[in-house]
Every structure is written in C-alpha cells, then in structure tokens.
Image (tube, helix red, strand yellow):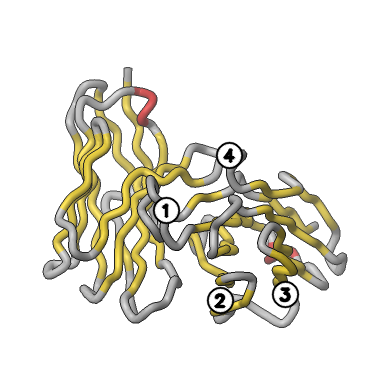
Amino acid sequence: DAGVIQSPRHEVTEMGQEVTLRCKPISGHDYLFWYRQTMMRGLELLIYFNNNVPIDDSGMPEDRFSAKMPNASFSTLKIQPSEPRDSAVYFCASSPWTSGRVTYNEQFFGPGTRLTVL
Amino acid sequence: KQEVTQIPAALSVPEGENLVLNCSFTDSAIYNLQWFRQDPGKGLTSLLLIQSSQREQTSGRLNASLDKSSGRSTLYIAASQPGDSATYLCAVRPGGGTYKYIFGTGTRLKVLA
C-alpha cells in the first residue's frame, strides 16, 4: 500500500490567496483526520470524517477553513483567504475501524504539506 | 478537559543506553493511547497502540506500558541506537466515542554515537 498521500508537499502563497491541500487516505480506512502542527501549539486536530461524513469540526480555527470528503479516496482542506498565521505543517491521517493485522483505531499519517503564507 | 504532557521535552543519551519516555494524561477515561515517532521534516510513524484494557505492548526494542489509574504511559527503548534519534509523541483517544485524539508536545531524543 502506498500509505496516505498528500499534495502538494510544499506550498508558498501570498496573504489573501486561496489554498487547497489534498489527501488520499489508505484504501479501506473508514476515518480521515486533518491536523495542523506548529512550534507554538504542537499537533492539533482540525476535523475528522467517518465514512466521508464530517463528525467533529470543532478544531477548525475559523470560517476561512473548510474541509470536504467527496468520496472515500479523496479529501481537501481549503483556506480562503489565507493569512500568515496559517503557516504550519498540515497532516492528513487515516484509520481503519478494524483490520485483521492492524489494531483498529491506529492512525497512519501522511508526509504533510508545509504551508507558508507570506 | 483532557491534557497530555510529555516530560522531558528533550533528552540526550549515549548509544546503548536503555531509556524511558514519559506521557501523562489528566483524565483516566481513555479509549486508547498511541505512541508515534516523528523524524525532522517528516510525518508521524505509529510505533505502538495500547487499548485501555491492556497494560503493555511490545514491538522489537520498544515496550509501551499504560497505567490508566495514575494517568501515565511510558515508552521503554532498549539498547538505544543513533537511528532512534527523533521526536516521540504520545496521543490519547478519550473515552465517550470521540476520535478527537489529543497529542502531547513530544520528547526530542538524541542518541549519541
């Protein structure tokens, strides 16, 4: 399996621009998570989906952030308009409900997207 | 509100030493606890996951224990190697059905050759 795939790996944009981050979870995983990591705040959960349905978005910082999961193999996190304080590494992770070899609820992380907003 | 703390924030040890990393949580009503490793500029790699009903999990040189009543978990690394140098994070999944994992701030480990 290719693991969780994120794109782009690096994004540099100017304040006010729209940013779209993409994630392909591991096939067969029922849960998808979006996290943000900064030096100041560590790793924070933004939103998570179960079977493509958003379950908890209480970590989404502002209305400028939105996330969608149109199907089981794709999710996006959008920031519009972007601000310098949004600069961070954004991680996507997925988790199975249960699997023969893998302990259920174990999270598998993608490599992250490093976002810089100038 | 669940809070997860990892102390120390950084640790340097000589190669070959056995070491223990600590993770503390304030609410004992957890579903599971997961230990991760993060290399600089990379994503998180899952090391071990302990369900609330378990006391420990082992994988190779790694052993993780869980004491829910005292709100503590430890990650034991035997015979440390320079390749073990990384940041180690623990994450708690609270009870009550949520998947809203709460992460500690991590311990940055450096194993000196």
Residue assigned mark 2: A59
Q: Earlier in the sequence, mark 1 or mark 3?
A: 3
Q: Are marks 1 and 2 on the same chain?
A: yes
Element marked by disc 3: strand
Q: CA distance from mark 3 to mark 4?
A: 28 Å
Disc 2 crowd, CA 10 A, few/some/many (<14, 14-19, 20+): some
Compared across the picture, whether B109 is left or right of A51 comes to: left
Inspect the image, locate mark 1, and give the three-letter code of the amino acid beneath it.
Ser
Element marked by disc 2: loop
Q: CA distance from mark 1 to mark 2?
A: 28 Å
The chain containing the residue under callout 2 comes to A
Of residues B110 and A4, the one nearer the viewer is: A4
Q: Earlier in the sequence, mark 4 or mark 2?
A: 4
Task: Return the mark for residue A66.
Answer: 3
Inspect the image, locate mark 2, and give the three-letter code of the amino acid beneath it.
Gly
Compared across the picture, whether B78 is left or right of A9 comes to: left
Residue displayed at 87% across by 65% down: A17
The chain containing the residue under callout 3 comes to A
Residue displayed at 61% across by 39% down: A2
Residue assigned mark 1: A99
Q: Earlier in the sequence, mark 1 or mark 2?
A: 2
Q: Are marks 3 and 4 on the same chain?
A: yes
Disc 1 crowd, CA 10 A, few/some/many (<14, 14-19, 20+): few
Inspect the image, locate mark 4, and give the three-letter code of the amino acid beneath it.
Asp
Residue assigned mark 4: A1
